């Protein structure tokens, strides 16, 4: 099980946004745009590659995903398209930078203030 965070409910350092566009080839960026899918996988590859495979931090909070009953994830070819995307990303990066680890968790409901 790989550690991947969906981009629709994540936060990350702003430097990764620039790294996304500078790390991926024009062909990969076009692929993501054309398929309107895979940006979350591509971002995770970029972040994992840049951090040396440090797993993402999972923050437990109230979140309701309204795309679970409709949207691209409900398409009949969704799993095949995601698999093709991972294959393209592995070729792009020359390896699979995602890590297999237990997650790091923070409970956002706890009182933690700086």
Image: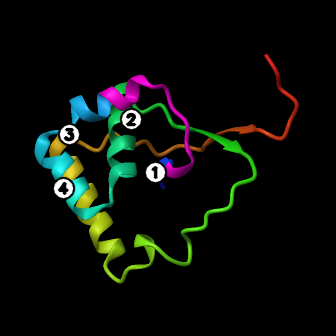
For label 2, the residue is 48
Please name which of the two marks, 4 or 2, marks the residue nearer to the observer.
4
> Can you give x and y, in whole percent of width and height, for residue 39 in the image?
34, 50
**Which of the 4 image quadrants contains residue 25?**
top left
User: Disc 4 versus disc 3: distance between alpha carbons?
Assistant: 15 Å
**Which of the 4 image quadrants contains residue 109?**
top right
Residue at 17 percent of width and 51 percent of height? 30
**Which of the 4 image quadrants contains residue 114?**
top right
Farthest-out residue, bottom: 76
Please name which of the two marks, 1 or 2, marks the residue nearer to the observer.
2
Asked if labels 3 and 4 touch by Cβ distance under 8 angstroms, the answer is no
Specify the label residue 2 is tagged with: 1
Disc 1 on helix, strand or loop?
A: loop
> Can you give x and y, in whole percent of width and height, for residue 106 in the image?
73, 36
User: Disc 3 versus disc 2: distance between alpha carbons?
Assistant: 11 Å
94 left or right of 18?
left
For marks 1 and 4, the one nearer the N-term is 1
For marks 3 and 2, the one nearer the N-term is 2
Residue at 24 percent of width and 55 percent of height? 33
Counting other residues with Cα less than 10 Å from the Cα at mark 1, is it few (<14), some (14-19), or many (20 or more)? few
For marks 1 and 3, the one nearer the N-term is 1
Q: Is residue 87 visible?
A: no
User: Disc 1 versus disc 3: distance between alpha carbons?
Assistant: 16 Å
Specify the label residue 31 is tagged with: 4
- Magenta region: which residues? 8-18
> Can you give x and y, in whole percent of width and height, for residue 3 in the image?
49, 47
């Amino acid at each position: 099980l790989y550690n991947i965070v969906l981009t629709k409910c994540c936060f990350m350092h702003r430097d990764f946004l620039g790294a996304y566009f500078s790390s991926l080839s024009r062909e990969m960026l076009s692929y993501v745009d054309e398929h309107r899918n895979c940006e979350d996988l591509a971002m995770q590859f970029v972040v994992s590659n840049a951090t040396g495979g440090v797993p993402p931090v999972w923050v437990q909070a109230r979140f309701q995903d309204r795309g679970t009953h409709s949207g691209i994830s409900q398409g009949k070819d969704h799993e095949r398209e995601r698999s093709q995307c991972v294959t393209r990303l592995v070729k792009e990066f020359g390896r699979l930078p995602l890590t297999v680890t237990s997650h790091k968790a923070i409970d956002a409901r706890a009182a933690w203030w700086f």
